[in-house]
Image (spheres, rainbow, N blue to C red):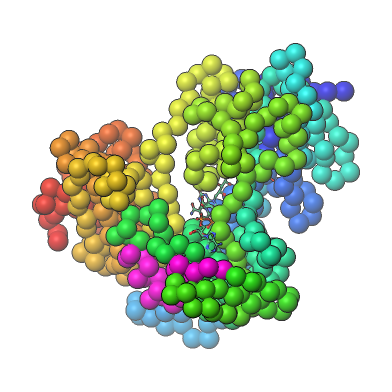
Amino acid sequence: MSKNFDVVVIGGGPGGYIAAIRAAQLGLSTACIDDWKNAKGGPAPGGTCTNVGCIPSKALLQSSENYEHAGHAFADHGIEIKGMSLNLGKMIARKDAVVKQNNDGILYLFKKNKVSFFHGRGSFVKADGGAYEVNVEPIGGAAGETLVARHVIIATGSSPRALPGADFDEKTVLSNIGALAIGAVPARLGVIGAGVIGLEMGSVWRRLGSQVTVLEALPSFLGAVDEQIAKEAHKLFTKQGLAIHLGVKIGAIVNNAEQVSVEYTDDKGVAQKAQFDKLIVSIGRVPNTNGLNGDAVGLKLDERGFVAVDAECRSSLPNVWAVGDVVRGPMLAHKAEEEGVAVAERIAGQHGHVNFNTIPWVIYTSPEIAWVGRTEQQLKADGVAYKAGSFPFLANGRARALGDTSGMVKILADASTDEILGVHIIGPMASELISEAVVAMEFRASAEDIARICHAHPSLSEATKEAALAVDKRALNF
Ligand code: FAD
Ligand code: NAI
């Protein structure tokens, strides 16, 4: 017998589970289907983000940074540690426990909000009389279910893209999944792709003792980041010990289970060969549309294989919506969440809205990199006249007290109106500092607005105020 709902959400990552909660809050009877399973085969909602993405990577970034500080930076504070050692098993187990807390938290939220959760794979069966029939193929031994709903939200996320000829075995050739669960620190770690995952995971294992080599196809480093910030990041990461090779062309990859060899041509066209104990391949991700059986209802994909949607996440089918990594736009958890909320509100007859111009980005390296809005190179390409102001953490009292003075805050404002067009930060706690910039841009603040706001002293946020003052060439502390 089928079960009827107002809304069925396929996928329980940040896009799907948040959409389901918001829909239920708005009084819609809601089901969420998710197929992720934990090591015991039980449900593990939260998707890539919770299980093998944002949360576990940040747990390991924190642990590995603590390890590095204990080994090096603490001595500067007069704290001398003798006989320090790494218990990698415990570090990984702690990361797994953090993940489980988040999985359990989502299951609790589903109960609290009366979202019906189905552990299984969802696929379209047919469209019938203004409603969609969705099959749930259960995980484990339970019986299958048929759900019927007027609205379906597809939130099936994305998976790592493999390099041809180098399948992920998650033992030697690793995607993000294996990279978060290496059992012993590899002496030589190769990383293909100097993007967000490559830099975050490369940082984790470098801090724990690996010799890390990063091979990047593009000739420039972090092309989407403001050039000045990317240059600073390249300098700092190289100084930390990441060997970053840009402009390479990857050739044959041979995985003999113990080691992996990578042939590549360097930026001068010279053939090179490198041997690694583990290889992380982080060259982007592909949308998960297999298994949805979209053909049964005529669901259209775009030319890149994403579910085709309009600006409001409507698919080619009436009342079928799609959010998060499975649709165009940045692959970020908070973007997926905002789309999920907006879609639930639209289904309920409200006017949900996502401002794509104010979605922040953060790379959780040390120092962190965070930005919102346009870069200098984008403003130049768009022909926008702008003023720039920046302030180094070297001149910030709190950063000195922390012992973490690398980087800067940089603000770009319209030359005539002073409206903030972009904020770019590399430095301590950039992930937290960027929120002020997002709020300012949402309210269409001018640089002068930030410059005139009282910021607590001593705080890292004073660097933002000083950068805003610097837009008008009147920084006080630099
Ligand atoms: P997902 O989180 O991928 O969830 C989709 C869910 O749907 C999964 O559980 C999947 O198994 C399930 N599913 C798929 N098909 C079906 C089906 N047919 N039936 C049932 N279930 C199905 N973003 C950030 O903003 N900040 C970060 O710090 C960050 N760090 C990251 C680190 C790593 C290593 C990685 C890989 C990604 C990171 N991301 C980060 C990106 C972030 O994880 C994604 O943008 C986010 O998870 C997308 O959410 P989603 O709900 O669209 O999809
Ligand atoms: P990415 O798009 O960030 O970086 C991929 C890199 O690989 C690019 O620099 C690209 O030029 C390079 N590349 C592509 N093909 C290559 C090849 N054949 N040889 C060598 N280099 C090649 O993708 P990544 O790191 O896989 O992450 C996927 C997505 O996950 C990110 O774009 C981001 O949206 C999300 N993510 C977000 C995080 C955050 O918000 N902190 C953390 C980790 C992931």
Residue drawn at x 45%, y 27% is 353
Residue drawn at x 78%, y 24% is 126
Q: Is residue 315 left or right of residue 353?
A: right
Residue drawn at x 80%, y 34% is 136
243 is within the stretch colored magenta: yes
Rendering coords of residue 90 (x, y %)? 64, 70
| The magenta segment | 231-250
Residue drawn at x 59%, y 36% is 302
Q: Is residue 184 visible?
A: no
Tell which of 85 and 178 is nearer to you.
Answer: 178
Tell which of 370 and 284 is nearer to you.
Answer: 284
Q: Is residue 62 left or right of residue 441?
A: right
Rendering coords of residue 316 (x, y %)? 61, 25
Rendering coords of residue 137 (x, y %)? 82, 38
Q: Is residue 221 visible?
A: yes
* Extreme residue in the bottom direction: 83
Image position of 208 with respect to 283: above or below: below
Image position of 408 with respect to 47: above or below: below
* Extreme residue in the top direction: 129
Quadrant in the picture for the N terminus = top right
Image position of 455 with respect to 318: above or below: below
344 is within the stretch colored magenta: no
The quadrant where residue 398 appears: bottom left
Q: Is residue 366 left or right of residue 161?
A: left
The quadrant where residue 291 appears: top right
Rendering coords of residue 392 (x, y %)? 24, 62
Tell which of 378 and 73 is nearer to you.
Answer: 378
